[in-house]
Image (tube, rainbow, N blue to C red):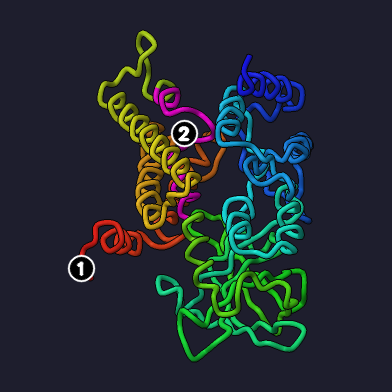
Amino acid sequence: MDALEQFRADTRAWLEENCPPSMRTPMPEDESPWGGKRAVWKNPESKQWLDAMASRGWTAPQWPSEYGGGGLSKEENKVLQQELRRIKARPALMSFGIWMLGPALLEFANEEQKKEHLPKIIRGEIRWCQGYSEPGAGSDLAGLQTKCEDKGDHYLVNGQKIWTSYADKADWIFALVRTDTTVKHDGISFLLIDMEQDGVEARPITMISGASPFCETFFTDATAPKGNLVGELNKGWTIAKRLLQHEREMISGMGMGSGGGGTGLADLAKDYVGQADGKISDATVRDSVARQKMDSHAFGLTLQRTTEEAKAGQGTGAASSIFKYYGTELNKRRNELIIELMGTQGLGWEGDSFSDEELSAPRSWLRSKGNSIEGGTTEVQLNVISKRVLGLPS
């Protein structure tokens, strides 16, 4: 048995012993493991699963072990992901720290900052949110005006952010702030701010779906120690662009889901449309489901290939805009197909005549529309693709 086969055998045995039974079932939205200081664990096994995975560094399997990561090679991580899928394991941790901030810290932070923040991210001890967009700086993000003043031993921050996902539940925020008002892109810095202070207020925004995942975030004489500046002063735009690539890749992955509530599209179609000889009975529906599954699979393979190329030093660059655009459209089409498969049962908003899965379908469908706005609008992505990928004139 070679080393990789031994790793698979050891991993499989460890997962069988440590993954609780309920963590091998579809995950309800109210059991999403976001972690953080104020986390409420509806299912205690969610916390048990997080602690177990974090003890191995497997919430961030390829991050360096000196910061609490798994230290796995890409081949080992591939095996780990295969074994997790084999037992249908839930994510142990959902985290903007894992998806966005952590990779940026690994690339731009100093050693002290890495040792301070990365282990806490991996263990799910701190819940992070992102402070980028402002009321007057959305598509033109570099026009942000949140002011950050040097006060000797600390920074003083005043301003407003908007569309801050889960800011009302977050412990810390990674924010773009203006440290030089005389220039645009070269006057932006990247700052980490503790939200547990009187100078920070988060107000939830109710969306059409009835949920409030986004917030307005206000800074009124909020403070941050000098050591919370990541990278160089006034060089935050470089970090911002790199982090946006990670965010867009994360959003693009939403297009790879298999169906509502953990149910596969084919099974959903059989339940609502009917089946004959084990196949979806309606040929048109069968074609739609097959096309969606093929597109999702092809997209997943492309993401996997690009990830491996990036780890080999080739990078993704503007290609992340392609992934964000396509993943967004794929996710919207998937949610529209789920509604179509459910028929009138997919249009319910409340009432005992609808199952939990049916009630979540229209909300997920409405939520998917936001994918084409967050992380850079579809129009922005198409501009990036036209200029930086296709080389078209402005």
Q: Nearer the viewer, residue 119 or 199?
A: 119
Location of residue 11 with respect to 344 vertically, above or below: above
Q: Which secondary structure type mostly characterizes the magenta part of the structure?
A: helix
Residue 252 shown left or right of residue 91 in the figure? left
Can residue 254 be seen by looking at this rendering? no
Q: Residues within 10 Å of mark 2 (few under 14, many from 20)?
A: some
Q: Is residue 144 magenta?
A: no
Residue 170 shown left or right of residue 212 in the figure? right
Q: CA distance from mark 2 to mark 1?
A: 40 Å
Q: Which residues are magenta?
A: 248-269
Q: Nearer the viewer, mark 2 or mark 1?
A: 1
Q: Which residue is mark 2?
A: 259
Q: Nearer the N terminus, badge 2 or badge 1? A: 2
Q: Nearer the viewer, residue 205 or 78?
A: 78
Give the amino acid at mark 1: Pro
Give the amino acid at mark 2: Gly
The residue drawn where x is 69% and y is 40% is 70
